[in-house]
Image (cartoon, rainbow, N blue to C red):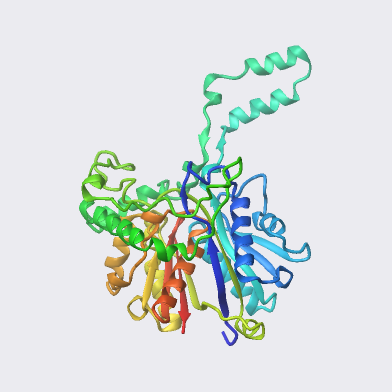
């Protein structure tokens, strides 16, 4: 790219376990908080933004095209545009690369991109049979008609389906994401102890990096009289995590023979990330000093039952296109969907220096708000490159449904 996309600055909310401090905030509100904090931090004029592009997987039904809702509530002018993108766990990456494609095609030069997810607020849904009965009840007329419609219900009609569970199950392979991790654990002969060791290291690194990660985070002031005590830190990292505690956890996805537990899997999390990105020439004209640039990207497909191997083909494709692979960059971030999944990727690539991998911890400790994770990996990698005096980083993720994503970032 003769005029590449640069990342000027970024900000994120704390990442909190689903059902905890951020549970009352919907995805659009989390995104608004992040965008508002970004504009405040940079002092950037929102009227200059051509488009807001946000990733979101569990899009709230009450805020369709959540990116547009975020943009307007964050104070962007009505004349700007907004689009929501969805590539499962790579949705945050998709927002960034979509902006790059807009730039390449001449459809804008300044963007706010990122991702948002409230996994706490993924709804419970009724079966189709129950929905028909509710529909019949709303159409019923008169006392007798309504009584007859009510009489058609059975106790099982009131047992909802968990939409989050359905969303984490692949419709092609029939496996949920944890079961795909079990497939890789068996195929690559990755022991339970090795997975727990990897999970422990994630917590240790995240705990040690708390002050560094705080540079990314904006406070979240909660409604309901709780504003005096804002949420200011990630909740997932456990400084006192131990192998003994991890060993006590039972397998979740294959209870008899499995090795994937809640402790060596990514945490279900709420959070949002916002990045100010633009053409490099535009940043220069505005006198802005970017924190990095997008130097290349790649998306690939793979077997949905082995979706965790997506980073392998994506990183190889990225290397073919840019000349830079896992062994030639200063940092590499691979989203920790599951310890078994990342360990399988490491065995497959064989050239990933583990001392450069996820140096500030990963999703096992920090959490994985699926629509936001790609943008978080990008922000974390660029901030760390800045602390190290520059260089290159690859950020990558496996994608539910059988895909891989990888971005090459530079801070030179």
> Residue 300, can we see it?
no
Q: Residue furthest front?
A: 228
Count of picture labels: 0
* Residue pictured at 60% horizontal, 19% vertical: 153
**Where is residue 157 drawn, in percent x and y?**
55, 25
- Describe residue 236's horizontal placement relative to residue 226 as left or right: left
Based on the displayed image, in which of its 4 quarters is residue 212 positioned?
bottom left
* Residue pictured at 47% horizontal, 80% vertical: 410
Q: In the image, is residue 404 above or below residue 317?
A: above
Based on the displayed image, in which of its 4 quarters is residue 308 positioned?
bottom left
- Describe residue 33's horizontal placement relative to residue 406 as left or right: right
* Residue pictured at 32% horizontal, 59% vertical: 202
- Tell me the quarter of the image containing the N terminus: bottom right
Q: Residue furthest bottom?
A: 2
> Residue 163, can we see it?
yes
**Where is residue 191 drawn, in percent x and y?**
21, 53
**Where is residue 407 drawn, in percent x and y?**
47, 72
Q: Considering depth in this image, is 280 or 168 the residue closer to the camera?
A: 280
Q: Considering depth in this image, is 137 or 359 the residue closer to the camera?
A: 359
Q: Residue furthest top?
A: 144
**Where is residue 6 drawn, in percent x and y?**
56, 78
Q: In the image, is residue 200 above or below residue 153?
A: below
Q: Considering depth in this image, is 208 or 92 the residue closer to the camera?
A: 208
């Amino acid at each position: 790219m003769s005029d590449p996309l640069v990342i000027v600055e970024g900000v994120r909310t704390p990442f909190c376990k689903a059902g905890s401090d951020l549970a009352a905030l919907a995805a659009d509100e989390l995104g608004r908080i992040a965008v508002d904090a970004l504009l405040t931090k940079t002092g950037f004029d929102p009227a200059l933004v051509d488009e807001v592009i946000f990733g979101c997987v569990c899009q709230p039904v009450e805020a369709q095209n959540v990116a547009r809702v975020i943009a307007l509530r964050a104070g962007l002018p009505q004349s700007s545009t907004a689009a929501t993108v969805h590539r499962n766990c790579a949705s945050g990456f998709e927002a960034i690369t979509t902006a790059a494609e807009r730039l390449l095609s001449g459809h804008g030069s300044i963007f706010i991109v990122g991702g948002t997810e409230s996994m706490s607020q993924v709804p419970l849904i009724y079966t189709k049979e129950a929905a028909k009965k509710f529909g019949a009840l709303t159409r019923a007329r008169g006392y007798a008609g309504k009584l007859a419609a009510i009489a058609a219900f059975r106790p099982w009609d009131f047992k909802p389906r968990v939409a989050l569970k359905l969303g984490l199950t692949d419709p092609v392979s029939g496996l949920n994401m944890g079961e795909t991790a079990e497939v890789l654990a068996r195929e690559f002969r990755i022991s339970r102890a090795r997975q727990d060791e990897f999970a422990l290291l994630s917590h240790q690194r995240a705990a040690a990096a708390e002050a560094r990660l705080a540079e990314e985070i904006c406070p979240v002031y909660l409604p309901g009289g709780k504003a005096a005590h804002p949420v200011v830190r990630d909740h997932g990292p456990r400084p006192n995590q131990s192998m003994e505690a991890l060993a006590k956890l039972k397998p979740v996805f294959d209870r008899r023979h499995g090795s994937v537990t809640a402790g060596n899997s990514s945490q279900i999390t709420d959070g949002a990330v916002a990045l100010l990105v633009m053409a490099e020439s535009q940043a220069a004209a505005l006198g802005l000093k970017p924190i990095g640039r997008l130097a290349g990207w790649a998306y690939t497909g793979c077997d949905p039952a082995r979706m965790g191997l997506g980073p392998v083909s994506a990183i190889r494709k990225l290397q073919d296109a840019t000349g830079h692979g896992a062994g030639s960059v200063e940092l590499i971030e691979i989203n920790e969907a599951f310890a078994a999944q990342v360990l399988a990727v490491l065995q497959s690539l064989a050239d990933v220096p583990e001392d450069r991998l996820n140096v500030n911890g990963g999703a096992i400790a920090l959490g994985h708000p699926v629509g936001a994770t790609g943008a978080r990996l990008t922000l974390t990698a660029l901030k760390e490159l800045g602390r190290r005096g520059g260089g290159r980083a690859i950020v990558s993720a496996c994608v539910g449904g059988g895909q891989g994503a990888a971005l090459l970032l530079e801070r030179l």
